[in-house]
Image (spheres, grey):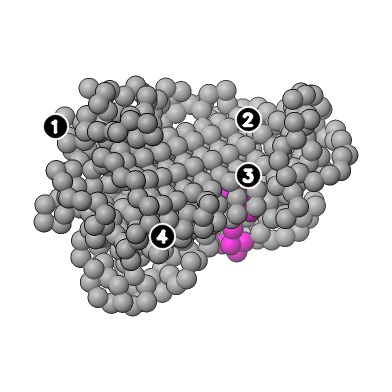
């Protein structure tokens, strides 16, 4: 790939559509130090879709604005955001993810204004725009009227690595990220306090007000070595996912902790025929059914809720425990024992299951009871040392659940080899033992 360095504002006028990154594409390096330059670099990328703009940020605070006349776009839902409708951008912040707090893009808490997201990617049937964001902190994005997420990708490609997102909001779907018919890869990322503040018991119908952190529809998504905490919505406090085959959702060595849902799926709610791959992850401390809602709204699944899910399931190495469902009910009738796992209707499609710890399996009868899979009468205590903020090898901090001495998850993974094998390292990059522990991180002792 060719690499060219351009002064900011210099653009090459090229024509042609973009389906995948051409092998002949040039990487054009642009250095920015102000928010004005950042906006201009994105506009230049959209004018030159056949090449990649590698935008290198100087350390600093980049607060997005909401001009009355947003150049090139007057749509209320994208006004003020960094937009890519045709182009390709690789946005680079710190050299190390542990230093990403010195590279801040701030949405400015737009409040009730018409301004909206931090990034808007896609919405074209001809081009496939691509955005890669590395080692940047994203914060304070909130629009009550735009009805869009702080990061929205619509028929595009999004990659986030070493990103920290805090204090983000939306009035509809995806308090941090919204994806539709897209490819999304999230790694080494910490999302905290992403919510839908409009969510109330009387307004929890349909699919709106879903996905406190991530709203993912008809997309292929991978989430690795990441944490989502303190986020919430009507349903899907951390993650709302629904897609058809051959799409898939992969959650690997990640932590979903202390998220909330007014109705169901405080950790994850999943439906559709796409496949779910859930491996070596920890889902704990999430609270569903936090309030009574109209009879039509089912309330269940503090940890994970399978709501009309009929796709393949690949599930091993996890800890799903100590989640809560406060006011469980379906059609006004109590639904007991739905704290950690709940299935609305049994699915009989292909299931590949391995060793995992589930505190109370609820009605997830595809998980046979064992010393590691409990019931409401005989729950399994995972033996956590408490939610802690811990650094990975790059110095970036994540909320995780370390295991205490005596935990039944210690050295408990009995993998069958091949795909179901212990990872070499855990969510924080620390080496795993053999046999390894269950959950996102290995023991500290």
- Horizontal side, residue 270 vs residue 99: left or right: left
Query: SS at mark 1?
Result: loop
- Say which residue label 2 marks: 92
Query: SS at mark 3?
Result: strand
Q: Quadrant of the N terminus?
A: top right
Relative to 332, residue 229 above or below: above
Query: SS at mark 4?
Result: loop
- Magenta-drawn segment: 144-154
Disc nearer the start of the sequence (2/4): 2
Q: Quadrant of the C terminus?
A: top left
Q: For the residues marked 1 and 4, what is the alpha-carbon distance in whole angstroms?
A: 37 Å
Q: Is the residue under label 4 in contact with that under label 1 (CB below 8 Å)?
A: no
Q: Is the residue under label 3 in contact with that under label 4 (CB below 8 Å)?
A: no
Nearest to the observer: residue 276 or residue 305: 276
Mark closer to the observer (3, 2):
3
- Say which residue label 3 marks: 157
Q: Is residue 146 magenta?
A: yes
Mark closer to the observer (4, 3):
4
Q: Main secondary structure of the magenta part?
A: loop
Report x, y in % for residue 86: 75, 46
Which label was assigned to residue 310? 4
- Horizontal side, residue 128 vs residue 143: left or right: right
Q: For the residues marked 3 and 2, what is the alpha-carbon distance in whole angstroms?
A: 16 Å
């Amino acid at each position: 790939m060719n690499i060219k360095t351009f002064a900011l504002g210099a653009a090459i006028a090229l024509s042609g559509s973009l389906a995948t990154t051409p092998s002949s594409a040039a990487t054009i390096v642009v250095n920015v130090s102000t928010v004005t330059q950042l906006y201009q670099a994105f506009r230049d990328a959209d004018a030159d879709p056949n090449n990649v703009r590698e935008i290198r940020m100087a350390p600093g605070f980049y607060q997005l604005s909401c001009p009355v006349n947003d150049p090139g776009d007057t749509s209320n839902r994208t006004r003020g955001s960094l937009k890519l409708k045709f182009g390709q951008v690789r946005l680079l912040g710190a050299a190390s993810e542990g230093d990403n707090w010195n590279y801040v893009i701030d949405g400015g808490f737009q409040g009730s204004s018409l301004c909206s997201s931090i990034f808007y990617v896609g919405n074209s049937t001809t081009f496939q725009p691509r955005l890669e964001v590395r080692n940047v902190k994203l914060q304070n994005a909130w629009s009550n009227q735009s009805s869009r997420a702080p990061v929205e990708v619509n028929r595009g490609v999004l990659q986030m690595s070493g990103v920290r997102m805090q204090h983000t909001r939306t009035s509809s779907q995806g308090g941090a990220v919204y994806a539709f018919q897209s490819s999304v890869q999230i790694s080494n990322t910490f999302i905290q306090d992403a919510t839908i503040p409009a969510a109330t018991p009387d307004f929890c119908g349909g699919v709106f007000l879903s996905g406190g952190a991530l709203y993912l529809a008809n997309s292929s998504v991978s989430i690795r070595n990441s944490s989502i905490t303190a986020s919430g919505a009507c349903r899907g406090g951390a993650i709302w996912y629904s897609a058809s085959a051959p799409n898939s959702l992969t959650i690997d060595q990640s932590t979903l902790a202390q998220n909330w849902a007014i109705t169901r799926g405080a950790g994850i709610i999943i439906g559709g025929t796409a496949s779910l791959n859930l491996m070596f992850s920890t889902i704990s401390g999430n609270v569903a059914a936090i309030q009574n809602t109209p009879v039509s709204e089912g309330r269940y699944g503090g940890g994970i809720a399978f709501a009309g899910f009929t796709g393949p399931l690949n599930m091993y190495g996890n800890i799903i425990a100590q989640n809560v469902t406060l006011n469980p009910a379906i059609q006004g009738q109590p639904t007991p024992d739905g704290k950690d796992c709940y299935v609305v209707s049994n699915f009989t499609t292909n299931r590949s299951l391995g060793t995992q710890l589930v505190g109370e399996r609820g009605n997830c009868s595809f998980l046979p009871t064992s010393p590691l899979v409990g019931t409401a009468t005989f729950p399994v205590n995972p033996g956590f040392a408490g939610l802690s903020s811990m650094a990975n090898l790059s110095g970036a901090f994540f909320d995780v659940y370390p295991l205490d001495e005596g935990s039944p998850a210690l050295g408990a993974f009995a993998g069958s080899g091949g795909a179901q094998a212990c990872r070499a390292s855990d969510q924080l990059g620390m080496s795993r033992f053999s046999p390894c522990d269950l959950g996102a991180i290995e023991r500290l002792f």
